[in-house]
Amino acid sequence: MHDAPPPPPHVRDPYAYGAGAEASGPVLGPFADDGQWPQDEPPQDEAPPEPAPRGLILRPASSIKIRPVRWLWDTTPEGAPPTSHGRIPLYSLAIAAGGPGLGKSQFAVWMTARITRGELPGELFGKPRPVIYAAAEDSWAFTIAPRLIAAGADMDLVFHVSVRDDERPHARLTLPVDTSLLAKEAERYSVALLVMDPLLSYIDKGVNDYRAAEVRQALEPLVEAADRHRFTILGLAHFTKSGTADPLARVAGSGAFGQLIRSLIAFAKEDGERDEPDRFVMSLEKNNLGRLGLPSYEYAIQPVSVETEEGPSYVSRFVLGEETTTSVREVMRDEGQPEANRGETNETVEWLRAYLTDEGGADLAADIKAAARKDGISESSLQRARRKLNVTMRHSGFGRNRRSEWSLPGALPEDGAE
């Protein structure tokens, strides 16, 4: 302690360096009243230097280290060029957006579970990592934790986040106020993903979320921190109730998100006709650092029962399905068109009837879809035509050997018939 140099005269504690009890002076520390004694003026040579004038700094491009894009979620199939199907880049802001009840939160839980188990295809496959999950609308005890269990997450690697603030007993995580604290904890625990559900709920109440410039100012520090401290952000967002068929334009706060996000995953539901179930579709609608036009996915939201000490808890989980050529953009476009204006549907009905008739009444679904694409028919139009014709679907095999066959009514014998 005595090897340390004494503090400057204007902040020195007389008791700390041998002064007697009779010495008097200010009490220093967190409760100090520094105004009770006038401060000595610092020497002229200790005056803070004047800030340098504003200027420009030019760097040659040759001095900038080039970095390859790495992907948190990469669905590149075997035989395709490496990382050609990257969907969410590492250390960036991605948005999962859709209308209410479409499974955005369940998708975030699904991704959380895969990351904590090291099962998400991409850069972290085989490398389990922690996740910070911030949920503003759902209860952890009743919803989030049971969903995580149902999805198979490693519960020791999922962190609930709260704020300790003596001046505000009910403080909540707020951006940009808590950005540096959040980044430090993410680096401390080697966090791979930060989920914010929904993202706009964590922006300071003084920020007008209808003004893109203000939202960007609140989120830009977090995006910079994600790159500096090596974690990825998955923000959940809602679609506005009306608007265009462009998913990005329908995202609440999209004026700011359009410049900040690197990936947009959109969710939509295609209503089933007659006795057909609804069809859920998820597609990549923005991909700044990779390819657009990647296959979409069908998905399902399954009810699950999770056992607790007080009885079963009933929640739902996200189940990723097969690839599909139907995009969320197509579903949204079809939603905005009255049934009477879908002239292509009747044409597709005639096309599908003729195709199946030529094939003897039945054919593999994959071959039908390929022929439809070749003739410029979207899968959503093809699916509507299938329902109108009451085409029967029959599945066989499992995994990669799973096959689906479509047939006109009565074209194939019933199960058990010759």
Image (spheres, rainbow, N blue to C red):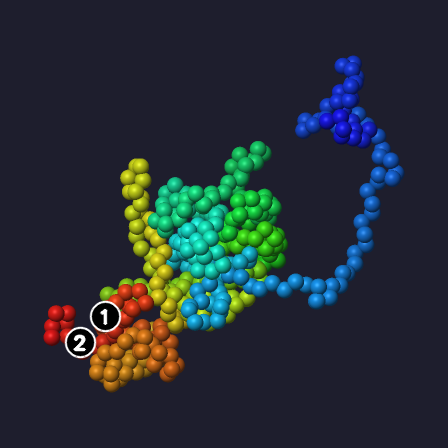
Check disc 2 and report the residue beneath it: 412
> Do the residues bearing badges 1 and 2 touch, measured as CB atoms within 8 Å?
yes
Q: Nearer the viewer, residue 244 or 374?
A: 374
Q: Is residue 199 visible?
A: no
Residue 159: x, y in percent?
Answer: 47, 44
Q: Residues within 10 Å of mark 2 (few under 14, many from 20)?
A: some
Vertical placement of residue 39 versus 359, above or below = above
Check disc 1 and report the residue beneath it: 394
Residue 337: x, y in percent?
Answer: 39, 72
Left or right of 318 on screen, residue 388: left
Q: Nearer the viewer, residue 148 or 397?
A: 397
Left or right of 358 on screen, residue 58: right
Vertical placement of residue 380 versus 226, above or below = below
Q: Residue at x 74, y 63 (%)?
A: 59
Residue 47: x, y in percent?
Answer: 84, 40
Q: Residue at x 38, y 79 (%)?
A: 373
Tell me how many marks there are.
2
- Tag 1: residue type? Arg
Q: Nearer the viewer, residue 321 or 39?
A: 321
- Label 2: element kind: loop
Q: Residue furthest right?
A: 44
Residue 8: x, y in percent?
Answer: 81, 31
How far is mark 1 from mark 2, CA to CA?
Answer: 10 Å
Q: Please state, as top left, top right, bottom left or bottom right, where the N terminus lies in the image.
A: top right
